[in-house]
Amino acid sequence: MRKRQRMISFVLTVIGLFLAVAFFSPILVLLNNSFKSLKNIYLDVLAFPTAETFITTNYPDAFEKLEFVKSFGNSFMITVCSTGLILVFCSMAAWVLVRYKTKKSKVIFMMYASATLIPFQCVMLPLVRLMDKLHMMNRPGLVLMYLGFGASLSIILFHGFIKNVPVELEEAARLDGCNMVQTFFLVVLPMLKTIMVTVAILNVMWIWNDFLLPQLMINKPGWQTLPLKTFLFFGQFSKKWDLATAGLIMCMLPIILFYIVCQKHIVKGVTEGAVKG
Amino acid sequence: MKRSKLGFWGFVLPSFVMFAVVVLIPALWGIGYSFTSWNGIGNDVAFVGISNYIKIFTEDGDFRHAFLFTAVFSVLVVICVNLVGFLLALLVTSKAKGTTLMRGAFFMPNLIGGILLGFTWQFIFVQAFGAIYNATGLEFFKNWLSDTKTSFFGLLILVVWQLAGYMMLIYIAQIQNIPDDILEAAEIDGANYRQRLFYVVLPLVAPAFTIGLFLSLTTCFKLYDQNLSLTNGGPYNSTEMLALNIYNTAFKYNNYGEAQAKAVIFLLVVSVIGLTQLNISKKKEVEM
């Protein structure tokens, strides 16, 4: 019986590892070819580069063509600022929506909940017109737009969490003379740490990878984010797979590193977002 | 707590104003635009009644195709993604070794943006498959993404590859919620693996299936980035999905009014899916 169990465990491990490699293989193929010249890529995609054909020049070339520092900086700033605004303003809103048990709170929360159904294509065209009129088609404007789009899911998640936070501490703080702002930032906020991480992870992943909104709003030289620049890069160099493979690997690297560093939080955040959202 | 009206609005408004500006107002405005001849350029917006809607259903073959394609494609994706996701979840919660590593590999595609994934698979299907065909002569690897069939399956493979790990996470959470003593009791009672899977695990994982099915369905229905970067709807618009069709109607053909009417239909379909899910999960709660 023991022997049979060990056998099963062994077979499952082999199958699992094989599948893991298979899942990873598209990226391995990409990585392999990013060290070859265009001629050698067309000669044989599957061959490994030999000592003579191994090159690293694709990377600096792609780095330059992607304006990597600039695009990465744009993506980074936009993602960090948007997520920061979402965390502060959505937790504030969710808190009062839970604590003020009025009809108004209920109506506003229902609006957020039903808005999760609205597909982006439905608001896209009037949004472009409206943002143009408000002079918001720039990077700070985009950050504010992300606050609006991220509000639904973030407030729902905060709302669900705050409902289970006991109100006694807040009441004590009020009795001690804290005003509303102090109560929230000094007493409530520190208790929201776990849900903050979840909301932050979900928003970072979505905003970092978002393509269509930046394409519509800030598609101007110098403002482009990484996904936007990758798309343009492909339009320009569609058959230049030597640059393209290196460029793709470079663009994937930040998110893969992010995943390796906070895998546990990401897994928890994504699961919670799916189940409760 | 002392109820201060000013405090309430001070806390609610910052996010609510932006939410109203980017979601509520454009959504209502957009429904209005769907009854006009708006072309996106000038300010001359004439009311044309429901003629946009009539045109979409009677003249626009591309939209009908995009709609059917999206529906068929989504159903296939939902079946494959959830089946694969569930099997992967069983595998990584089994007694196999190195399951943390496996989880990481299976979930990783989900983190990478759709644009990058589309281009990556374009390279695999066109260049790598081409090389395999040249080396082995197997018909299967010939000319991917150049005809309707391989483009369809190419997109299917990409989406299943991307979403399976996401579904896996949902199923893992549910499988780990099953108390060990139930499974042990079943084992002591002489239930073999198949019986435990079908009579203990599956019924207890059922609530997660509702989530998994609808989540993958709505994600797939709204698919845009991958569609754009893998096939861009080609060849001959055969793989153009709804979101891409709406985008092209507006920005390629400058029919904003018509695009907006399509978006309203899109909204109705997504809402029906969403409300169905709500109903099902509510019923389940009552039963439990």
Image (tube, coloured by chain):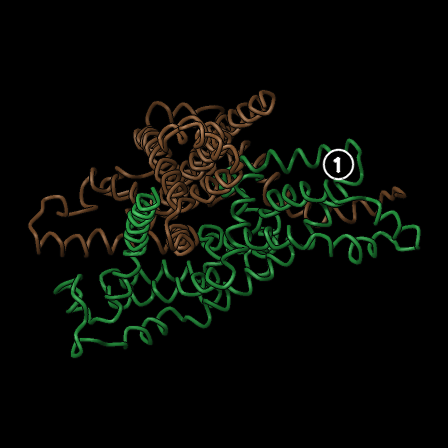
Chain colours: A green, B brown
- Coordinates of residue A38 in the picture (x, y in percent): 19, 68
Is residue B36 in view from this perspective? Answer: no
Q: Is residue A29 above or below residue B68?
A: below
Characterize the local packing of mark 1: few (<14), some (14-19) or many (20 or more) Cα atoms within 10 angstroms.
Answer: some
> Residue B275: which quarter of the image?
top right
Residue at figure coordinates x 32%, y 51% from the top left: A13
Nearer the observer, B88 or A99: B88
Residue drawn at point x = 26 percent, y = 44 percent: B154
Q: Chain of mark 1?
A: A
In the depicted structure, whether residue B285 falls above or below residue A202: above
State the residue position of label 1.
A105
Does residue A247 lie above or below B90 as drawn?
below
Residue at left 84%, top 51%?
A: A180
Residue B82: % across, % down: 39, 36
Residue A152 picture location, percent across and down: 61, 42
Q: Nearer the viewer, residue A13 or B286?
A: A13
Q: Is residue A241 left or right of residue B113?
A: left
